[in-house]
C-alpha cells in the first residue's frame, strides 16, 4: 500500500456459505428441531396463560358477567389468537426449513448468514470486486475466502 495515496475505510456485507456435510445437516436439523420444540412449549404456555387470565377476570367479575367483563375476555382471546398465529407461522417456517435441509445434497453450498467487515480502498481499486466477498465454511472451518480482500 502506497501511503501517499488517499485511502478510505469502508464497510461491506460478507456472505458466509456452508458446504453441506453430514455433520452440518445433523447440526442444522437438531437446531431446527429444538426451535420447533421451543415453539410448541410457547404455544402450550400461551394457552395456559390465556386461560388463567380469563379465569381470573371471571372470578373477579359479577355473575353473570357484564359487557365490560365480556369485552376483557374477548380482548384476551384476540391477543392469544394473534400470538398463537405468529408462533404457528414460525413453527411452519421451521418445519419447512427442516424438510429442505433433509433434501440438500452433500458438498452443495448454501447461504448460512451474512456479516459485516471493513476494508480499505484507494484510487485505482475496483470497488465492485472489493464489495463481493464470501467466506465458505466446511463444518465451521473456513475453507475458502472468495473475492478481493
Image: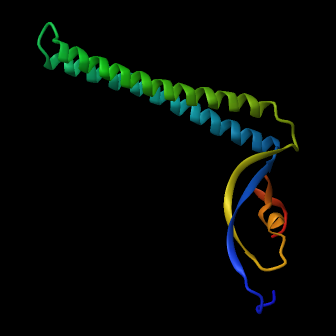
- Residue 139 at least partly seen: no
Outermost residue on the left side: it is 62
**Residue at image coords 84%, 70%:** 126
**Residue at image coords 66%, 62%:** 116
* Residue 61 versus residue 99 in the image, above or below: above
Residue 98, position in %: x, y?
Answer: 70, 31
Quadrant position of the N terminus in the picture: bottom right
Instruction: Name the foreground residue: 84 vs 39.
Output: 84
Instruction: Answer with left or right where residue 89 lies relative to residue 74.
Output: right
Q: Which quadrant of the figure has residue 121?
A: bottom right
**Residue at image coords 15%, 6%:** 64
Outermost residue on the bottom side: it is 4
Residue 14, position in %: x, y?
Answer: 73, 59
Q: Which quadrant of the figure has residue 91?
A: top right
- Residue 131 at least partly seen: yes
**Residue at image coords 80%, 68%:** 127
* Residue 112 versus residue 76 in the image, above or below: below
Residue 71, position in %: x, y?
Answer: 25, 17
Outermost residue on the top side: it is 64
Quadrant position of the C terminus in the picture: bottom right
* Residue 141 versus residue 78 in the image, above or below: below
Q: How is the image coloured?
A: rainbow
Residue 53, position in %: x, y?
Answer: 27, 24
Outermost residue on the front side: it is 123
Q: How many marks?
A: 0
Amino acid at each position: 500500500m502506497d501511503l501517499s495515496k488517499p485511502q478510505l475505510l469502508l464497510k461491506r456485507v460478507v456472505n458466509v456459505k456452508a458446504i453441506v456435510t453430514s455433520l452440518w445437516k445433523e447440526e442444522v436439523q437438531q437446531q431446527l428441531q429444538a426451535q420447533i420444540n421451543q415453539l410448541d412449549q410457547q404455544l402450550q404456555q400461551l394457552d395456559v396463560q390465556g386461560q388463567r387470565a380469563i379465569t381470573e377476570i371471571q372470578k373477579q367479575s359479577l355473575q353473570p358477567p357484564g359487557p365490560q367483563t365480556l369485552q376483557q375476555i374477548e380482548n384476551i382471546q384476540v391477543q392469544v389468537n394473534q400470538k398463537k398465529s405468529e408462533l404457528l407461522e414460525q413453527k411452519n417456517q421451521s418445519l419447512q426449513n427442516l424438510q429442505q435441509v433433509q433434501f440438500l445434497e452433500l458438498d452443495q453450498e448454501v447461504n448460512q448468514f451474512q456479516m459485516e467487515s471493513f476494508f480499505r480502498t484507494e484510487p485505482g481499486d475496483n470497488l465492485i470486486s472489493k464489495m463481493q466477498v464470501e467466506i465458505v465454511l466446511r463444518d465451521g472451518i473456513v475453507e475458502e475466502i472468495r473475492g478481493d480482500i
